[in-house]
Amino acid sequence: MATRPILHYPDPRLRTKAVPVDVVDDSVRALIDDLFDTMYGAPGIGLAATQVNVHRRVLVVDVSENRDAPHAFVNPVIKDAEGEQERDEGCLSVPGFFETVKRAEQIRVSALDRNGQSFELRAEGLLAVCIQHECDHLDGKLFVDYLSNLKRQRIRNKLRKQAQSGRGTKARA
Ligand code: K2U
Ligand code: ZN
């Protein structure tokens, strides 16, 4: 098990549409374990394989206070979505920015678990938001896409400057 580097917006690889997993084998289970290590280490409450530059339809979430309620989803599909909720969202791929996003209040999601068994989960509140946020990642979508062009451009410019200054420092060193 290991942590993996997280891609940062506006890295174009974050726009890749992930491909379905054919067989949930040991490589997928190792990916799930690394996603959990990376998520808990960040720390975060969710992480999609896209964010670590692996373009397979796999995501993990744990929104529990005690960090003891892990859920892994392979080939997740949101079957139903009802109601509306607005929450401040962050993203490990957009560090330091939090903005309000409107999403469904309740969802019904089907997926395969880490053993390849099908399951269905009804979620609401923060768990529902997190699953929707991570499913967006698998389709190359980020929470900043729900913001105005002006806000998104400002975030993109600030993160580009941070990345360049970080590179400049390394270059001087
Ligand atoms: O995709 C990610 O980068 C994971 C997000 C999950 C998230 C989804 C919806 C709303 C908020 C967060 C990260 O966990 S962002 C960091 C974070 C950690 C704890 C609570 C809120 C945000
Ligand atoms: Zn995210």
Image (spheres, rainbow, N blue to C red):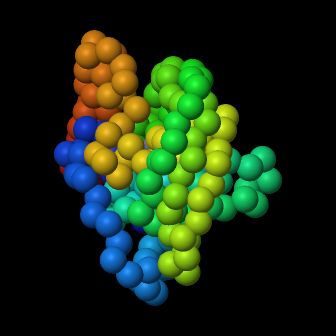
> Which residue is painted at 52% across and 58% down in the image?
110
> Which residue is painted at 61% across and 36% down in the image?
106
Q: Between residues 30 and 128, which one lies in front from this camera angle? A: 128
Above or below residue 95? Residue 58 is below
> Which residue is painted at 25% across and 20% down in the image?
153
What percent of the width, then of the height, locates residue 18? 29, 58
What percent of the width, then of the height, locates residue 83? 58, 26
Task: Give the number of callouts.
Answer: 0
Work out whether residue 26 can be spotted: yes
Q: Residue furthest bottom?
A: 26
- Asked whether, in this view, residue 65 is left or right of residue 42, the answer is right
Q: Between residues 99 and 117, which one lies in front from this camera angle? A: 117
What percent of the width, then of the height, locates residue 126? 65, 37
Above or below residue 3? Residue 132 is above
Work out whether residue 34 can be spotted: no
> Which residue is painted at 55% across and 81% down in the image?
115
What percent of the width, then of the height, locates residue 23? 38, 81
